[in-house]
Image (cartoon, grey):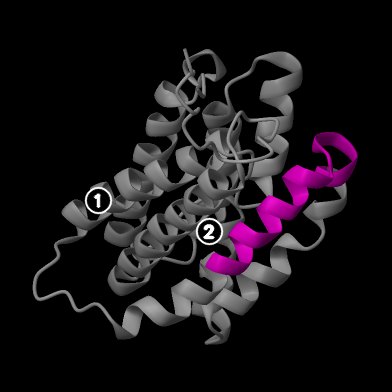
Amino acid sequence: MTQPAAAPQDPKPTATGHGPVADAQGLLFGSAMAAFGITILTHLGLVTGQTAGLAVILSYLTGWSFGPIFFVVNLPFYWLGYRRMGLRFVLKTFIAVALLSLLSKVLPGQIAFATLTPWAGAILFGCVTGAGLLALFRHGASLGGIGILALYLQERTGFRAGWTQLVFDGCLFLVAAFLLPFDRFIWSLLGAVVVNIVIAINHRRDWYVAT
Protein backbone atom coordinates (compact mmCIF):
# COMPACT_ATOMS: atom_id res chain seq x y z
CA MET A 1 0.00 0.00 0.00
CA THR A 2 1.35 3.39 -0.98
CA GLN A 3 2.27 5.58 1.98
CA PRO A 4 0.79 9.09 2.03
CA ALA A 5 3.18 11.85 1.09
CA ALA A 6 4.75 13.65 4.00
CA ALA A 7 3.47 17.13 4.75
CA PRO A 8 5.72 19.91 3.43
CA GLN A 9 8.13 21.17 6.02
CA ASP A 10 10.11 24.36 6.45
CA PRO A 11 13.52 23.38 4.99
CA LYS A 12 16.86 23.43 6.78
CA PRO A 13 15.78 23.93 10.38
CA THR A 14 18.04 26.16 12.44
CA ALA A 15 19.53 25.50 15.87
CA THR A 16 16.33 26.83 17.44
CA GLY A 17 14.31 24.09 15.72
CA HIS A 18 12.65 26.62 13.39
CA GLY A 19 13.16 26.81 9.65
CA PRO A 20 13.90 29.94 7.58
CA VAL A 21 10.24 30.83 7.00
CA ALA A 22 9.37 30.51 10.68
CA ASP A 23 12.45 32.50 11.64
CA ALA A 24 11.61 35.25 9.14
CA GLN A 25 8.12 35.77 10.52
CA GLY A 26 9.46 35.60 14.07
CA LEU A 27 12.03 38.31 13.38
CA LEU A 28 9.46 40.49 11.63
CA PHE A 29 6.86 40.04 14.37
CA GLY A 30 9.33 40.67 17.18
CA SER A 31 10.80 43.76 15.53
CA ALA A 32 7.36 45.16 14.67
CA MET A 33 6.10 44.74 18.24
CA ALA A 34 9.22 46.41 19.61
CA ALA A 35 8.83 49.28 17.11
CA PHE A 36 5.21 49.72 18.17
CA GLY A 37 6.38 49.86 21.77
CA ILE A 38 8.96 52.54 20.91
CA THR A 39 6.24 54.51 19.11
CA ILE A 40 4.16 54.49 22.28
CA LEU A 41 7.16 55.40 24.40
CA THR A 42 8.31 58.38 22.36
CA HIS A 43 4.73 59.62 21.90
CA LEU A 44 4.51 59.94 25.70
CA GLY A 45 8.03 61.32 26.11
CA LEU A 46 9.12 58.35 28.23
CA VAL A 47 12.33 56.32 28.26
CA THR A 48 13.17 52.68 28.71
CA GLY A 49 16.15 50.55 29.59
CA GLN A 50 18.79 48.61 27.64
CA THR A 51 20.41 50.05 24.52
CA ALA A 52 16.98 51.17 23.30
CA GLY A 53 16.71 53.36 26.38
CA LEU A 54 20.12 54.84 25.71
CA ALA A 55 19.10 55.57 22.12
CA VAL A 56 15.82 57.18 23.27
CA ILE A 57 17.64 59.46 25.72
CA LEU A 58 20.17 60.46 23.06
CA SER A 59 17.36 61.17 20.59
CA TYR A 60 15.68 63.47 23.14
CA LEU A 61 18.95 65.28 23.87
CA THR A 62 20.11 65.68 20.26
CA GLY A 63 16.85 65.84 18.32
CA TRP A 64 18.07 63.05 16.04
CA SER A 65 15.80 60.16 15.11
CA PHE A 66 15.72 57.10 17.35
CA GLY A 67 16.27 54.62 14.51
CA PRO A 68 19.74 55.67 13.31
CA ILE A 69 20.98 56.20 16.87
CA PHE A 70 19.75 52.77 17.94
CA PHE A 71 21.43 51.15 14.95
CA VAL A 72 24.79 52.81 15.66
CA VAL A 73 24.69 52.20 19.43
CA ASN A 74 24.36 48.47 18.82
CA LEU A 75 27.37 48.15 16.51
CA PRO A 76 30.01 47.54 19.25
CA PHE A 77 28.04 44.60 20.65
CA TYR A 78 28.08 42.48 17.50
CA TRP A 79 31.65 41.33 18.09
CA LEU A 80 30.72 39.97 21.53
CA GLY A 81 27.70 38.31 19.99
CA TYR A 82 29.83 36.71 17.29
CA ARG A 83 32.47 35.48 19.73
CA ARG A 84 30.04 34.18 22.32
CA MET A 85 26.78 33.32 20.51
CA GLY A 86 27.84 32.53 16.94
CA LEU A 87 27.46 34.01 13.47
CA ARG A 88 23.83 32.90 13.03
CA PHE A 89 22.77 34.71 16.20
CA VAL A 90 24.61 37.90 15.17
CA LEU A 91 23.11 37.91 11.67
CA LYS A 92 19.59 37.47 13.02
CA THR A 93 20.18 40.17 15.62
CA PHE A 94 21.55 42.54 12.98
CA ILE A 95 18.41 41.97 10.88
CA ALA A 96 16.15 42.55 13.91
CA VAL A 97 17.96 45.77 14.84
CA ALA A 98 17.79 47.02 11.24
CA LEU A 99 14.06 46.23 11.08
CA LEU A 100 13.38 48.01 14.35
CA SER A 101 15.40 51.04 13.24
CA LEU A 102 13.40 51.21 9.99
CA LEU A 103 9.97 50.52 11.48
CA SER A 104 10.47 53.03 14.30
CA LYS A 105 10.75 55.73 11.61
CA VAL A 106 7.74 54.48 9.62
CA LEU A 107 5.17 53.69 12.33
CA PRO A 108 4.78 57.19 13.86
CA GLY A 109 3.44 58.40 10.53
CA GLN A 110 0.94 55.52 10.39
CA ILE A 111 -0.45 55.57 13.94
CA ALA A 112 -2.26 58.31 15.88
CA PHE A 113 -3.33 58.14 19.52
CA ALA A 114 -6.52 60.06 20.33
CA THR A 115 -6.18 59.18 24.01
CA LEU A 116 -3.26 57.46 25.69
CA THR A 117 -2.64 58.08 29.36
CA PRO A 118 0.94 57.65 30.63
CA TRP A 119 0.15 54.76 32.97
CA ALA A 120 -1.78 52.84 30.30
CA GLY A 121 0.87 53.58 27.69
CA ALA A 122 3.67 52.41 29.99
CA ILE A 123 1.93 49.09 30.64
CA LEU A 124 1.03 48.61 26.97
CA PHE A 125 4.61 49.41 25.98
CA GLY A 126 5.89 46.82 28.45
CA CYS A 127 3.54 44.11 27.22
CA VAL A 128 4.03 44.52 23.47
CA THR A 129 7.79 45.04 23.76
CA GLY A 130 8.10 42.02 26.05
CA ALA A 131 6.15 39.92 23.54
CA GLY A 132 8.41 41.14 20.74
CA LEU A 133 11.58 40.32 22.64
CA LEU A 134 10.27 36.85 23.51
CA ALA A 135 9.62 36.18 19.83
CA LEU A 136 13.14 37.28 18.93
CA PHE A 137 14.69 35.20 21.73
CA ARG A 138 12.73 32.15 20.63
CA HIS A 139 14.06 32.50 17.09
CA GLY A 140 17.67 32.88 18.16
CA ALA A 141 17.96 36.67 17.98
CA SER A 142 17.85 39.75 20.19
CA LEU A 143 17.74 43.51 19.80
CA GLY A 144 21.45 43.74 20.40
CA GLY A 145 23.28 45.55 23.14
CA ILE A 146 22.60 44.34 26.64
CA GLY A 147 20.28 41.70 25.22
CA ILE A 148 23.30 39.90 23.77
CA LEU A 149 25.02 39.93 27.15
CA ALA A 150 21.82 38.87 28.94
CA LEU A 151 21.27 35.88 26.64
CA TYR A 152 24.91 34.88 26.90
CA LEU A 153 24.75 34.88 30.70
CA GLN A 154 21.52 32.87 30.67
CA GLU A 155 23.03 30.29 28.33
CA ARG A 156 26.21 29.98 30.41
CA THR A 157 25.00 30.42 34.00
CA GLY A 158 21.22 30.01 33.99
CA PHE A 159 20.77 33.54 35.34
CA ARG A 160 17.55 34.79 33.75
CA ALA A 161 17.95 37.27 30.89
CA GLY A 162 15.21 39.44 32.36
CA TRP A 163 17.07 39.91 35.64
CA THR A 164 20.31 40.86 33.87
CA GLN A 165 18.42 43.47 31.89
CA LEU A 166 16.73 44.74 35.04
CA VAL A 167 20.11 45.42 36.66
CA PHE A 168 21.30 47.30 33.58
CA ASP A 169 18.05 49.24 33.46
CA GLY A 170 18.53 50.31 37.06
CA CYS A 171 21.82 51.96 36.17
CA LEU A 172 20.34 53.66 33.12
CA PHE A 173 17.39 54.98 35.08
CA LEU A 174 19.70 56.56 37.63
CA VAL A 175 20.85 58.77 34.77
CA ALA A 176 17.30 59.30 33.48
CA ALA A 177 16.19 60.49 36.93
CA PHE A 178 18.25 63.64 36.42
CA LEU A 179 16.95 64.26 32.90
CA LEU A 180 13.18 63.68 33.12
CA PRO A 181 10.36 65.29 35.09
CA PHE A 182 9.45 63.12 38.06
CA ASP A 183 6.12 61.90 36.67
CA ARG A 184 7.64 60.81 33.35
CA PHE A 185 10.44 59.10 35.21
CA ILE A 186 7.95 57.06 37.26
CA TRP A 187 5.90 56.02 34.23
CA SER A 188 9.08 55.14 32.34
CA LEU A 189 10.18 52.97 35.23
CA LEU A 190 6.81 51.19 35.23
CA GLY A 191 7.15 50.35 31.54
CA ALA A 192 10.67 48.98 31.97
CA VAL A 193 9.60 46.85 34.93
CA VAL A 194 6.71 45.37 32.93
CA VAL A 195 9.04 44.47 30.03
CA ASN A 196 11.48 42.68 32.29
CA ILE A 197 8.81 40.87 34.30
CA VAL A 198 7.29 39.54 31.06
CA ILE A 199 10.71 38.26 29.94
CA ALA A 200 11.79 36.91 33.34
CA ILE A 201 8.60 34.88 33.75
CA ASN A 202 8.17 33.65 30.19
CA HIS A 203 11.67 33.18 28.76
CA ARG A 204 12.49 29.56 29.59
CA ARG A 205 14.32 27.33 27.14
CA ASP A 206 12.54 24.18 28.33
CA TRP A 207 9.23 25.67 27.20
CA TYR A 208 10.51 26.16 23.64
CA VAL A 209 10.19 22.80 21.95
CA ALA A 210 9.70 23.34 18.23
CA THR A 211 8.06 20.56 16.23
Residue 153 in magenta stretch: no
**Residue 47, visible in the rendered structure:** no
Q: Give the range drawn in magenta.
A: 81-99
In the picture shown, does residue 206 fall above or below 136? above
Q: Which-is-in-front pick, marks 1 and 2? A: 1
Report the residue at 72% width, 38% height from top.
149
Q: Is residue 146 left or right of residue 63?
A: right
> Amino acid under label 1?
Leu
Q: Nearer the viewer, residue 20 or 169?
A: 20
Numbered label attached to residue 11: none
The tag earlier along the polypeptide, 1 or 2, is 2
Numbered label attached to residue 53: 2
**Residue 137, visible in the rendered structure:** yes
Name the image quarter holding residue 137. top right
Numbered label attached to residue 124: 1
Report the residue at 54% width, 49% height from top.
21
Residue 91 in magenta stretch: yes
Q: Is residue 79 left or right of residue 55?
A: right
Query: Badge 1: how crowded within 10 Å, few (<14), some, or many (20+)?
Result: many
Residue 81: x, y in percent?
80, 44
Residue 53: x, y in percent?
53, 58
- Considering every residue shown, the one lying at the far left of the view is 115
Identify the element where label 2 is drawn.
helix
Report the residue at 25% width, 47% height from top.
123
> Amino acid under label 2?
Gly
